[in-house]
């Protein structure tokens, strides 16, 4: 997997219907019926299918949807309101965004499972307050992960990200590999836990 | 200063600190299902990674299995059979215990995990499914994760976590008759927003919660994810241990002193506290496209986001009750356990649903619930009233592209999500308790279950 490109410059595409949408759920990002195989690929076409297509089966585009407008087609930065990515835990939502080419999602807040899925797939989730968000809509912005800031024209906005998530994005680290460097500590902990809570450890029955 | 229940479970499971400042939290149980589980197992195999302790990983076929009687591997969802056969093969290769399509104990993941005694007080349990929080009802730290995190948990036995904040939601007083756990959680979300629990683990407490049975507690915790919380949980008590004792994967008895420590200390501090008067809660029904768009059944539609009004076709100011519905659905991990079916059947007994209803179905949460219901004759009540009686699974809690409701239907549903398209393209979903679904099916329109209960009382 590739690390997060830095710095990244692109047009911020707003998911809106009058105002920035709140509660964009994973059924809207990728409906269950678009999850057609057990793999992680082939999902970009189904991204935002309910909004992007006037007829999803025929893939007939809805010209009003933001990513179908010439200015925003193929955008790498998405803007939305509060509680983005709520709903199902399906990582397919993030895989679909990543496959489409989205690198950054900026929202007022994120649903927790979705946020974690973003980090594991090298999409940068940025939380900003509403007034700042609205100022970014449709503008070219530059995201600097190292400096934890984004700039739009003359304005610069700092953003928070925890140190570990930042490092994983910047260096393209695989979380499992990283954790396995501490395998010995886990083994030691498990040995003492087995004595303390034996009932947790099941005998295999299959 | 004392500790909260969550903090105690966190401390017990903190296996190591990472260089980046996270904690490696040991994971006691992992539960997969065929919709997202195969993807995780497949990728692990591709990467040459193995499950650390297969005896503590379980899987079930529930999300896209057919629920029509006589089912096999084939489903109406295009390509669905591949998910089932691939999951089966992957579980076998990994040595994971699988509850297969027609196994005696098959059912929705969050229904069968407690039935089997897989979830226990004080354990950590994760599943690539957002409603894993249901199982917090047993005093477990149980939460939904993505596929990558499921792989991480299976391979390393841990997850890398930042410590979440804590919130306590206290339901004081007693519920009125006809009001249920579903109405409690919808009241919380309506009042504090679908993002209200973000960043927090929510402990549910108070007199009304203590009075609830385990099934109602599961309904309450089920929708913590609709509140955007990491999870919800309830301190275990005698009811919890009584429910679990003797179940297949549970210990034979709960006499270890560890169990009695599983509660928030008197002087424990929470980052946030919410108190709700349980006695003031009414049966709740959603009107819009987010669970926060929910009002008392006898209320009027408020002014919400334009798109929500447009999608559901309900304008501000109209009464919600009396809105004609086409479909009634009783099922899902929120409300498909035996007590849910009993309460709905009580309302339906001796009555028939309105002729305008195009489809009405009951999908028991597990085959064990189904057997129990049949032993009590509930299936006959549902069928006589005009409902279809199904095999267990997630069914039309969500639309996977196979079986669907009639185009453009308005449904009253005991499920947990009223998102646009959740139950099918253009389907308008109103979420409510099983008794409100039953009452609405009888009326052919959104209806207050208390009206039917009053009729019963008057007749008695
Ligand atoms: S019943 Fe619905 S909410 Fe529950 S696990 Fe199945 S699909 Fe998810």
Image (tube, coloured by chain):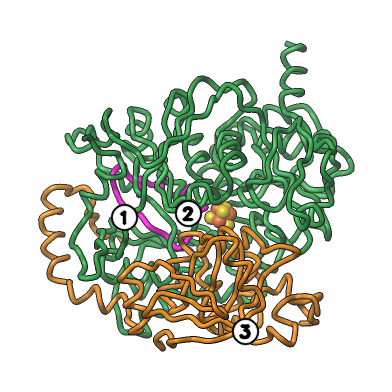
Chain colours: A orange, B green
Extreme residue in the right direction: B356
Q: Residue at x 65, y 50 (%)?
A: B390
| Distance of label 3 from label 2 (alpha carbons) | 38 Å
User: Can you say whether A192 is above or below A9 in the image?
Assistant: above
Residue A75 image point, x, y percent: 62, 84
Label 2: element kind: helix
Q: Residues within 10 Å of mark 3 (few under 14, many from 20)?
A: some
Q: Nearer the viewer, residue A179 or A3?
A: A3
Quarter of the image containing the N terminus of chain B? top left
B300 falls in the magenta region: no
State which mark lies toward you, 2 or 1: 1
Q: Residue at x 36, y 62 (%)?
A: B97
Identify the residue under disc 1: B163
The span picked out in magenta is B103-129
Q: Nearer the viewer, residue A65 or B413?
A: A65
Identify the residue under disc 2: B109
| Distance of label 3 from label 1 (alpha carbons) | 34 Å
Q: Residue at x 26, y 59 (%)?
A: B25
Give the left or right position of residue B27, taking residue B366 as reference. left
Label 3: element kind: loop
Ligand 1: give its quadrant.
Answer: bottom right
Pointer 2 and pointer 1: residues touching (CB < 8 Å)?
Answer: no
């Amino acid at each position: 997997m590739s690390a997060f490109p830095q710095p990244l410059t692109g047009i911020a595409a707003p998911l809106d219907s009058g105002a920035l949408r709140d509660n964009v759920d994973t059924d809207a990002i990728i409906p269950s019926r678009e999850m057609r195989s057990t793999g992680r690929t082939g999902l970009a076409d189904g991204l935002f299918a309910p909004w992007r297509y006037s007829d999803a089966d025929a893939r007939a585009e809805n010209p009003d949807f933001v990513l179908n407008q010439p200015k925003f087609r193929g955008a790498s930065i998405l803007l939305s309101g509060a509680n983005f990515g709520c709903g199902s835990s399906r990582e397919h939502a993030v895989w679909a965004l990543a496959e489409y080419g989205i690198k950054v999602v900026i929202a007022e807040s994120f649903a927790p499972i979705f946020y974690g899925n973003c980090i594991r797939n090298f999409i940068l989730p940025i939380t900003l307050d509403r007034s700042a968000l609205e100022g970014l809509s449709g503008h070219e912005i530059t995201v600097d992960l190292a400096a934890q800031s984004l700039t739009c024209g003359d304005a610069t906005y700092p953003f928070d990200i925890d140190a570990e998530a930042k490092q994983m994005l910047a260096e393209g680290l695989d979380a499992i590999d990283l954790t396995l460097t501490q395998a010995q500590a886990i083994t030691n902990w498990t040995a003492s836990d087995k004595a303390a809570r034996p009932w947790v450890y099941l005998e295999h029955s299959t | 200063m004392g500790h909260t229940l969550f903090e105690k479970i966190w401390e017990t499971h903190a296996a190591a600190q990472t260089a980046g400042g996270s904690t490696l939290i040991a994971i006691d149980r992992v539960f997969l299902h065929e919709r997202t589980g195969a993807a995780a197992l497949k990728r692990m195999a591709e990467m040459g990674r193995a499950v650390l302790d297969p005896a503590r990983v379980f899987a079930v076929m529930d999300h896209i299995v057919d629920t029509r009687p006589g089912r096999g591997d084939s489903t109406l969802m295009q390509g669905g059979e591949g998910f089932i056969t691939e999951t089966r093969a992957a579980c076998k290769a990994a040595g994971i215990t699988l509850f297969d399509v027609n196994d005696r104990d098959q059912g929705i993941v969050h229904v069968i995990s407690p039935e089997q005694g897989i979830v226990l007080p004080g354990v950590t349990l994760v599943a690539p499914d957002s409603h894993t929080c249901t199982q917090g009802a047993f005093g477990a730290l149980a939460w939904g994760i993505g596929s990558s995190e499921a792989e991480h948990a299976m391979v390393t036995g841990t997850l890398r976590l930042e410590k979440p904040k804590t919130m306590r939601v206290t339901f004081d007083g007693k519920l009125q008759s006809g009001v249920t756990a579903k109405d409690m959680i919808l009241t919380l979300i309506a009042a504090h927003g679908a993002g209200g629990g973000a960043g927090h683990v929510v402990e549910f407490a108070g007199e009304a919660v203590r009075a609830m049975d385990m099934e109602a507690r599961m309904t309450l915790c089920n929708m913590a994810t609709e509140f955007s919380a990491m999870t919800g949980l309830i301190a275990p008590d005698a009811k919890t241990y009584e429910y679990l004792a003797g179940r297949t994967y549970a210990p034979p008895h709960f006499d270890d002193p560890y169990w009695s420590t599983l509660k928030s200390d008197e002087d424990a501090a929470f980052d946030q506290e919410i108190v709700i008067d349980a006695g003031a809660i009414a049966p709740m029904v959603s009107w819009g496209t987010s669970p926060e768009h929910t009002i008392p059944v006898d209320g009027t539609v408020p002014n919400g986001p334009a798109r929500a009004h447009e999608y559901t076709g309900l304008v501000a100011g109209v009464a919600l009750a009396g809105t004609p519905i086409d479909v009634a659905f009783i099922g899902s991990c929120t409300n498909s356990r035996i007590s849910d079916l009993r309460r709905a059947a009580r309302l339906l007994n001796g009555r028939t649903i309105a002729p305008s209803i195009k489809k009405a179905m009951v999908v028991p949460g597990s085959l064990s619930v189904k057997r129990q219901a049949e032993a009590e004759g509930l299936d006959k009540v549902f069928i006589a009233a005009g409902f279809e009686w199904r095999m267990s699974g997630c069914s039309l809690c969500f639309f996977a592209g196979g079986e669907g409701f009639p185009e453009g239907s308005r449904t009253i549903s005991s499920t947990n999500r009223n998102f646009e398209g959740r139950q099918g393209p253009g389907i308008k979903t109103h979420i409510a308790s099983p008794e409100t679904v039953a009452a609405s099916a009888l009326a052919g329109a959104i209806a207050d279950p208390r009206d039917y209960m009053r009729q019963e009382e008057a007749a008695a």
